[in-house]
Image: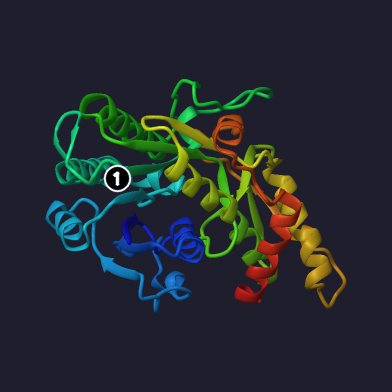
Amino acid sequence: MNSVLVTGGAGFIGANFIDYLLQNDLSIKVVNLDLLTYAGDIDNTRAFSESDRYTFVEGDIRDREQVEKIFADHDIDGVIHFAAESHVDNSIAGPETFITTNVNGTFTLLDVARDAWMDEPFKVKPGKQENRFLHISTDEVYGSLGAEGLFTEKTSYAPNSPYSASKAASDFIVRSYHHTYGMNVVTTNCSNNYGPLQHDEKLIPTIIRNAVRGKNIPIYGDGKNVRDWLYVSDHCKGIWTAFNNGKSGETYNIGGLNERTNIYIAEKICNLLDSLLPKDNGQSYKEQISFVKDRPGHDRRYAIDATKITEELGWKADENFESGIEKTVKYYISKYA
């Protein structure tokens, strides 16, 4: 049985991924390393916490001694690296933890894996030939798009926030370990995820929570910032596809081909709430939408071209935005209402 280390597995995407993995590959044993900061919630692991193929370790990816112990105790064959500080507003207010976690933490994981799996540059230890490190990144490393075009794997990096800069730096470290040491690494860059278990601070949960609680629904600027939205289970499937079938040293963009403005999302959610949870007074939730001061350096548009992972690895999304957002709204109604 192979042992996979998942970092940040008590977070939104990480917990969804572990659940997906344990259900879809019965040969896998998962070790979840998570520091349980504000974005990590042990309740997110409830669905699989009793599995005999699952182990939780509370700890820090920057703690080399602890990471080395996990590799030794569990004979780790693969790493799926989610753990990261990821909220842009928080990176603007306090960038230091984004640098230490996203950059130094990624380095620590990579270097421990290198020591465990390789004897020297381009010489893998016997029995470790298939071991792989998959690094989860973001479309934000590419910067901001104009009205046309898509981010591809060849798009130049142009990060515009401390968060995206820290992720760009970690991407480059991963790349360097492939080219310098011959490590078996793959990177995935994804568009905005949504779905069950997402942290309350994120856009879609905030819209739903404020709506059902009768509060203003805050939308930055003019609401016309565009993001490409990817349902979390489709992302999980893409990650596992890239881990198993991706080419070493390559990057794969995973996107939903669902570009939507922030104001469209707010209005769509309000329309769904009007149908699923109508107000007693008959008014629409849209009346709660309010526009607030834009945040510094707010990228105007992101959109991912997922052609490479689709054509080379056979991945495709099962959900479009309209089907995914309805599932998501129903989940958060049960949580907030």
- The crowd level at tag 1 (other Cα within 10 Å; few <14, some 14-19, many 20+) is some
Corner quadrant of residue 232:
bottom right
Label 1 secondary element: loop
The residue under label 1 is: 131
Residue flagged by tag 1: what amino acid is it? Asn
Residue drawn 47% across the image and 49% down it: 240
Percent from the top left, x then y, of residue 58? 26, 67
Q: Is residue 26 visible?
A: yes
Residue drawn 23% across the image and 45% down it: 128
- The extreme right residue here reads 282
Corner quadrant of residue 214:
bottom right
Residue 27's place in the image compared with 236, above or below, is below
Percent from the top left, x then y, of residue 309? 55, 35
Residue drawn 29% across the image and 62% down it: 35
- The extreme front residue here reads 126
Q: Would you say 104 lies left or right of 42 here?
A: left
Percent from the top left, x then y, of residue 111? 18, 41
Q: Nearer the viewer, residue 300 or 228?
A: 228
Percent from the top left, x then y, of residue 123? 17, 32
Residue drawn 44% across the image and 31% down it: 251
